[in-house]
Structures are given as structure tokens and as C-alpha cells.
Amino acid sequence: MATLSVEILSPEAALWSGAATALIARSSEGNFTILPQHTEMVGDLVSSIVRVETVEGEVAFAVHTGYFQVGPGDGEGVTLATVLAGVAERTTEIDVARAQAAKEAAEAQLAAATKGDQSDDTAQLVALAALERAELRLRAATK
Amino acid sequence: MAGGQERVLRRRIKSVLSTRKITKAMELIAAAQIPRSLARIAANRPYRLGMQRLVLEAALGDPAGAAKLLAMPEHVDTALVLFLTGDRGLSGPYNNSSLRAGERLVAKLKGESTEARLFCVGKKAAAYFRYRGLSVEEHFVGFVDRPTFANAQEIARRLVGPYLEGEAQQILLVSTRYLSAGSQAVHVQQLLPLVVPELPVDDGPKVLKGYTEFEPEVKKLLYFLAPHALESEIFSALLEGAASFHTSQQRAMAAATDNADELSQTLTRVMNRARQDSITTEIMEIVGGAEALRLGK
């Protein structure tokens, strides 16, 4: 029987691995779903929520950009999908209060960076990235 | 009086023993850090291998683009060299062996008329090169004991900038690799242009055959992938550097503790001898005095 095995990896730890029925995520070209026996594939992931559907239910991760690779796994008929993300966390482990605070701090920074005639481009980009991360965390945690 | 010598010895033994207390404590602390840093290397391993596999796959998917991105230029005018050392000393050969290797590398680059721009991680590297009159472009301190991925990203960002702008054609890394508990080796590694990793043989079946789908197209992917591959390599080097540092420090401090034990033992013997000597002399004096008195009667 064809099965799908999924690994969610970050540099600090392997977050999750196991058998799944589908992997749903978003690349720079749009949403996609990986099912067992998907063809070999390599791609990027934009900041989004990655869902792993298993027999027991759904496991979701907030992924702040990364890459994925689909290839043959160990054993007959096993498809291995690997998600590599610099920063990723399980949605159930997100600290909502902290994300909310981070969001407000990022908004304040963004306002400070855009204020006045001499807008600081780097600071603006940093604040925008922080805001995006905080918003993704909130979206992932409250869904 | 011989009692003076005894007092001097007693003071030296006390000082050796208090140094021993410090080295013993440092040994225990370093020993406690080792398993933790090894666990972090193990946790990082799947990501690192996954990233290498991804680079390999992308390189196979677009050999022409990969050739452009991965090929060495005919002459490297400027190379960025990243050194990895500790913030602290008292760690045996850890800092010095990598600095010596680094200095040899800089001399070699100079021989090939390549200008080396130095980037240092850890206090020791920056201090070493500044002392020798080499300018250090940037240095990063304060996290080598417990590096985080954000640290690696920060370093990578500083290195990639000049590379992408064409100011430098090569990025090299000098770091200590943790091979096993008994063996750590200084290793010079080229970070960019990317080196297509050779995968361990047991990962053979997982390597794809080069007819993979790419999203976005492989040229774009490879271009964006390069900085991330750099981050991943730097992070694993930081982790292995931390583990090597703790191992090296533990071994150095264990040796120092043993030395202190030996020294205090030797000194104690000398001191006891000196005490015995002074007692013997005193007895001789008393006996001699009594004898003189008896004879004089």
C-alpha cells in the first residue's frame, strides 16, 4: 500500500515525523497538497501554515519560510516528504499572548521606521518581517 | 631557622589546592555541557542532511545554472574567511590550533595574491588577529557557548552581502569539527561557491535521479537556496565548535587538576621533610646543650 511519511525539520530540532495521509502547504507559486506516490519534487515554502493530515487527525505548523522535498522513502511504496524550515512551531505550542505582544511591538517599530522624511528602509523591512511572523503565529494559533 | 621554609611550603600548597578547586569546578561544568551540546548536534543533523540533499537535488536539476553558481572563478581576488573560536581561554588547544590553521590559510591566500577579509566568531580570534596587525572586518561574540540559529543567520547575512555584490568570490570557514569524544579537528571548508555535498553511502536510495519537479523553477530556487545552505552549514559548524570547546576544556581542566594533585603531593612531602629536619636539628641542639652543661658541671 502506498503511504506517505512526513518529516518537519528545523535546525534546532526535528519537530515532527510520522505517517500521514496528506501534506498541505503553500509555495511561492501557490497552495499544494502532497499525497502518497507524489512525484519527486523540490520547492520553497512561503510563510504559511503547513498541515499534516494523519489517520488520527490534523497536525499543523506555523512555518516562516522554508523548503520542501518529496522523494522515495525507506521501503516499498513509501513517499517521503521533508519540510525544512529555519523557524517553525507547532500551532498548539504557540504562546498567543507573546505573539500578540510581538505584533504590537512590531507595529510600533514599523510606525517609528516609516515616520518622518528619512524612512529607514532596513528597519522597516525588519519590522515588517517581525509583524508578518507575529500575524502568522496568531492566525495559526487561533484557527 | 628551618621553620621559615616550612611556612613557605605550606603557603604554596594552599595556593595549589585552591587553584585545583577552580580547575576541578571548570572540569565538571564543561563535562556537564558536553552531552547538551552533543544533543543539539544530533537534533540539527536531519535538517543539515535534508538541506544538503536539497542542494544536491537542485544542482542535478539545473546543471548549467549550478555550474555557474557552483563553479570557482578563474582567480579569486577577494575571499571572505570566517574563523570560529571560543570566547574564553583555558580550553587546551581549542583556540590556538584553529588560529594557527587560520593564519596559515591567510598566508597561503596571500601567496596566491588573494586578499583575505577576516570575519571572526569568538573573542579569541578577533584579539589574535588584531594583535598581529591584521584588520578584522567584523566580529561576533557572546554566543559561542550556546549558539542559536538566529546567530548563524546573522553571520550568514553579513557574509552573503559582499559575495552577492561581487566584492568577494569565495567564502571560507575555519572551524573545529567534532569527530568524536576523543578527536576534534580543525577543518577549512568552502561555503560559497556551494560545494555539492557528497552524501553518506547509506543514504543512497534517498537520492533522486534528477528528473524532479521544481517550484519555483530551479534557477530561482537554487539562487535563493544558496544563502540558506550557508546558514545551515554555519549553524552546524557553530554547534560542533561549541561541543569541541567544551570537550577540549574538560580535558584540559582534568589534566590541570591532576597536575595540581601531583604538585601538592610533592610539596607536602618536601614540607614534611623540612619539618622533620627542623625537629631533628632542634633535638640535636637540646641534646648538645644538655651534654655541654653536664660536662661543664
Image: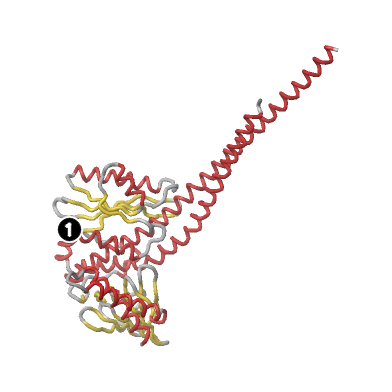
In-image side of A134 versus B7 (left or right): left
Residue occupying image coordinates x 18% and y 44%? B112
Location of residue B271 by image quarter? top right
The chain that hosts pointer 1 is B
Q: Quadrant of the C terminus of chain B?
A: top right
Q: Nearer the viewer, residue B269 or B44?
A: B269
Mark yes or no: residue A28 visible.
Answer: yes
Q: Position of residue B198 (x, y in %)?
A: 28, 61
- Residue at point 18% right, 64% down? B66
Type of amino acid at the residue the image marks with label 1:
Ala
Q: Quick check: can you spot residue A68?
A: no
The residue under label 1 is B71
Of residue B83 and residue B41, the one placed in the foreground of this image is B83
B83 above or below A3? Answer: above
**Viewer-nearest residue: B238 or A3:** B238
**Residue B264, position in %: x, y?**
59, 39
